[in-house]
Image (cartoon, rainbow, N blue to C red):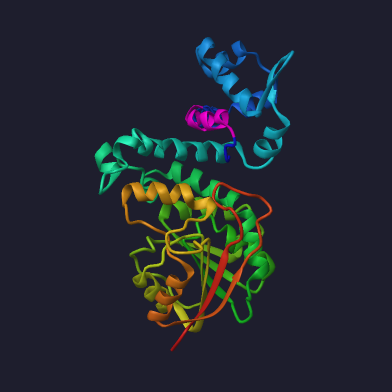
Amino acid sequence: MKPATTDEVLEILEAPFTSAALGTAFELGLFWLLDEQPLSVAGVGEALGIPQNRCNYWLQLLEKTGLIRETEDGYVPSSTARQSILETYSRETWAFLAQEAREISPALHDLALHIRVPGSVMDSLDFTPVNYVLAMGENPERAARFTRMLFELHHPLATQVAENLDMEGIRRFMDLGGGSGVVSMAVLKRHPECTAVVVDIENVCSAGSHIAGETSVANRITYHPADFTKDNLPDGFDMVLECDVGEYGTDLFRRIRGALNPNGRLVIVDQFPPAVGVARPGQLHWAFERSLRDPEFRFLTVGEVRERLAGVGFEVYSEMTLGTPSVTSATFDKGHTVIQARRVG
């Protein structure tokens, strides 16, 4: 929202209340509750265990967003909520997205008092953000929820990647950090001659294998548990696919090169900033949050990734931009860049 009036400026200043109210609605399942039947303030309060007067103001906050509306029979989801929430992602995915937003919100506490800190704002706040990889490694249930969430969010991107990848000569490929394997599944459906190996941490692989078992390509996709940022990778691949992963260290690139057959390909799909220090719209809040941990943090540009690839024995032979996904998600704003590189030597 770009404010045009004083009232709109003040509305942005009060936005944390609306954001918290909406996140709570997702985590408590309010929209799905009201989709089953209209409920009064008392009915919502009783169903969710919220004191009635507090519930009254919470529902008014949500009504102001236009996502619920009050009828003679009680509150119901608005048409916007039905189209943008209920018909887009599952209740579980919305709840997990809201949980992740809530978990990082302490980083913004008393920001005006800490933004000048030359080091980590998190240290000043004595706040340790959730490390999602470690959290999933310790908690299979969280890993399953995270994996299912990304399975839903990545569907439009997976379809685009599968439609645009040149798979000539590819029989076996690795999906590095592939989570559920949603991109692999889309590729395998278009290319029945191929098999895929998803490499991710153990709990994610377990969740992904369960999802894959529900698909028609279950017999052509396997899961290899590993922390790909440091563990040895399986080898013998015609192609390695790294889609929306964001890990571009030279050590990882060397290990990917070793996993490829001669002349094997590395395909990177991601959203890269247009210039050094400029964040894309869909990544701006993440860039700012990361800068609160490390004031020098920034996302790498395409050019910097290409230089790293060349430095470890890859030749970039293609770069293209995918169109806008048919469904906008919390992760994406517009088209992804696809870098295709070939192992040299």
Q: Where is residue 269 in the image (x, y as percent from the top left)?
A: 54, 65
Quadrant in which the N terminus appears: top right
Q: Position of residue 181 (x, y in %)?
A: 55, 59
Q: Position of residue 343 (x, y in %)?
A: 47, 82
> Residue shown at 56%/28% (left/top)?
7
Give above or below for 306 relative to 53.
below
Is 7 inside the magenta-drawn segment?
A: yes
* Closer to us: 258 or 219: 258
- In the picture, measured across the screen, residue 25 lies left or right of residue 104, that is right
Is 72 inside the magenta-drawn segment?
A: no
The quadrant holding residue 297 is: bottom left
Q: Where is residue 145 in the image (x, y as percent from the top left)?
A: 50, 43
**What is the number of callouts on the image?**
0
> Residue shown at 46%/75% (left/top)?
306
* Stretch in magenta: 5-17
- In the picture, measured across the screen, residue 5 lies left or right of residue 227, that is right
Kindly give the residue lying farthest to the bottom in the view shown. Answer: 345
From where the camera sits, is residue 43 visible?
yes
> Residue shown at 46%/66% (left/top)?
301
From where the camera sits, is residue 134 visible?
no
Quadrant in which the C terminus appears: bottom left
Q: Main secondary structure of the magenta part?
A: helix
Give above or below for 28 relative to 328.
above
The quadrant holding residue 139 is: top left
* Closer to us: 127 or 258: 127
Give above or below for 188 relative to 138.
below
